[in-house]
Image (cartoon, grey):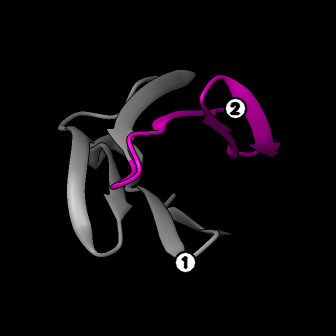
Amino acid sequence: MANSWKYKYGDNEIVVKNKGFNGEELYVNGELQDKIPVGGMYASRLFGKLESGEEIKVSVGGFLKMQCCLFIDNKLQSE
């Protein structure tokens, strides 16, 4: 089961792709910043950074339905 989430943060586009058992990827403005090659059973964590220096942390997981939580500088932006 594959899922994709898109977020806008200022002028930045953040895209998270969950490819099921084929892993997860984090893109910031079209640039791959983190990748987990094999999907986890329940949860994964991806990390990146904006050009401004702000840290990105993404939590992807779920059991019956995959969910994505985006944190920028440790502040929840979206669930």
Q: Amino acid at mark 2?
A: Gly
Please say if the residues under marks 1 and 2 sit with CB atoms less than 8 Å apart: no
Question: Of the residues shown, which amino acid type is indicated by label 1?
Answer: Asp
Taking the spot 35% from the left edge, 73% from the top edge, the residue there is 29
| 1 vs 2, front mark | 1
Q: Position of residue 21 (x, y in %)?
A: 33, 42
Q: Residue at x 35, y 34 (%)?
A: 39
The numbered mark at residue 55 is none
Q: Is residue 38 above or below residue 68?
A: above
Residue 20: x, y in percent? 41, 48
**Residue to which mark 2 is pinned:** 62
Q: Earlier in the sequence, mark 1 or mark 2?
A: 1
Judged left or right of residue 19, residue 4 is right
- Provide the residue span drawn in magenta: 50-79
Q: Is residue 64 visible?
A: no
Work out whether residue 61 or residue 52 is closer to the camera in this orientation and state it: 52
Label for residue 11?
1
